[in-house]
Amino acid sequence: MRFFTLLFCLFAVLQVQAQLGFCSGSKGDAIFHEDFGEGNGPGEELPAGVTNYSFVQSGPYDGQYTIADFSYGLNSWHQISPNTAISNGKALIVNADYAAGRFYRKEISGLCENTTYEFSAFLINIHDRGSAVCMDGGIPVNVRFEIWDNTDSILLKSGNTGDIPSTASPTWKQYALTFQSEPGQDTVILKMFNNGEGGCGNDLAIDDIMFRSCGDLTDISADRGSDRVYTICEENTPAEISLRATPDNSVYQQHFFQWQNSFDGEIWQDIQGANSSDYMENSVNSTTYFRVKVAEDAVNLSSNKCSSASEPFLVEVIETPEAPINNGDISICSDEEIPALSVMAGQDESVYWYDAPTGGNLLAEVSPSFLAETSGTYYAEARKLNADCAGSNRTAVRLTINAVPEVIDEIMQICPDSNLTLDAGMAGNDYLWNSGETSQSITVSSPGTFTVEITNPSGCSSVKTYEVEDVPNVEIAEIISEEGSVTIVPEFSGDFLFSVDGINYQSSNFFEYLPGGIYKAYMKDLANCKTVVKEFPHIVVPKFITPNNDGYNDSFRLKGLEYFENSSIEIFDRYGRLLKMGKGEDFIWQGQFGGKDLPAADYWYRISILGFPDRKGSFSLIR
């Protein structure tokens, strides 16, 4: 019996003096965090009873300590500020006493009963192995942590860091152990011991001493969504979701639950009555985070320091975007390059362009700008990126393309010793002549180049140019009458107007499809300074005849000779033999000689008109 008693005691001691280890589950908020202060320079002395080492505000020697953010420049120490993963401020710097023993004692209150905790601290061997001051890198650091009950009579847990050798570069490392508070217990005592003796080395810094509750890792699963996220469009709200909490049983022996929600993922509030592992929410209208607190005792659920919390599950409601902001309607002139229309949407939104306020055709996508080709109103819609949700109301953006005044440059002539009026036309516009005048028309008295900028009420402008020239000499060199057309040939080069009736003038000197007769050719300059007139006969001679009695081109007959007092016509064959002659106005020949039909061939004519030169030519007889 005595043997089993000794065995039980040995087992209990081994349990208490277990190896260091971190909480394998989730951790609560810190109930105690000693960071030894912030800022630069030396810190304050520790409260009485925390250590029996002597405090100095300089480099500590064996059995001394200091609070600082640097190591005071001792040649064999790393010259660094405490650079931990948490506070990055001052640290407790200890030069070990020659005799091994305790160097730190601290009562930690505010614990929750019947709760598993993790104690942790960051340590560093501050001896610089590269300094070669100590043989073989000096005495290693070796620290033992002990957790006692509030009576300082029951050891709850302890553990050793093992040897921490010096390094050539500063290296912080975090150490931890876990323990469980007992029912009714809210205070423990932390003790730290230096297991090695003083001498060359065995110098350490410690920072960020923390106590946090340790609980199961609890996973939240849902009937929809994945990776702890469920996304829904605003138009499909209110949404419902079924959540389930599953602890991993790594720490707790029994589980009590409290579901919470949050609208920002930071501030959490309990959901009344949600105290089981399953939770059903059926009225999510906005983005909401859900998590569950888990504790081994129901009384600990009221404190984040006495329970553990799961990672949150996010129900993300994709809000319908606001309508994009119009960057401005655009109005341009038709001779300008068309700029792009644009709107401004949110950073997490893309823009789609349509040709109607609702429905319509998609014109462009995923672009805040759109290059239209024609005037009109276009509509921009914002949509959330990476979400197949409804778009915003559409924003109208208008493109107006205003016509510019249509102008045609003119060449005009001015009569000698006279004035000429230049009229820009298009009343109701603004005018600016190169002479500085602003009227619709101006009067000039000499040749030159004159321009006028015409601006319409839309602000669009065109420039019209007038080339004013001296009047050229007006004379008719000849009149060519052939094949039903007439050409009036000027004696001198220049721009003129021509007519064959004295009423209708044209810039071309060519007239076609004129019936035969006596005509007058009219020619004048553009300024109407001078007009010359010349009379001429216009005889329309057929090119061929087909005497087949079909009523078309059956005979050689000249139209227009009836307008002349005395005319005659002679017909010859290819050998010059006279086949027929007679007065012009009554002359008809149907391709016969001596009462017989002549063969198909080319025949010649001579037309004589009193007062005009004879006219000669040929025509074809076709059978």
Image: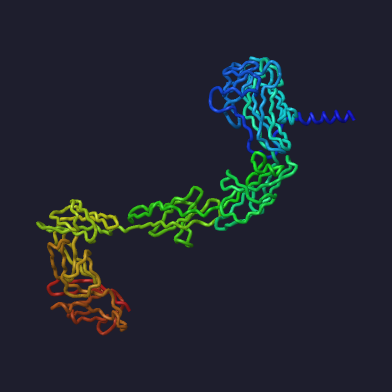
Residue 179 position (above or below residue 455): above
Q: Quadrant of the C terminus?
A: bottom left
Does 267 appear above or below 164?
Answer: below
Identify whether 507 is placed above or below 105.
below
Residue 463 sits in quarter: bottom left
Image point (24%, 81%), residue name: 589
Displayed quadrant of residue 118 = top right
Residue at 74% x, 30% y: name it. Answer: 157
**Farthest bottom residue?**
595
* Residue 186 placement, left or right of 491: right
- Image coordinates for residue 111, horizontal then vertical, percent: 67, 35
Q: Residue furthest left?
A: 417
* Residue 311 placement: quadrant: top right
Q: Position of residue 5 (x, y in %)?
A: 86, 30
Along the viewing direction, whichever of 372 and 127 lies nearer the viewer: 127
Q: x%, y% of residue 113?
A: 70, 38
- Residue 459: give x, y in percent of width and height: 29, 55
- Front one among 84 and 434: 84
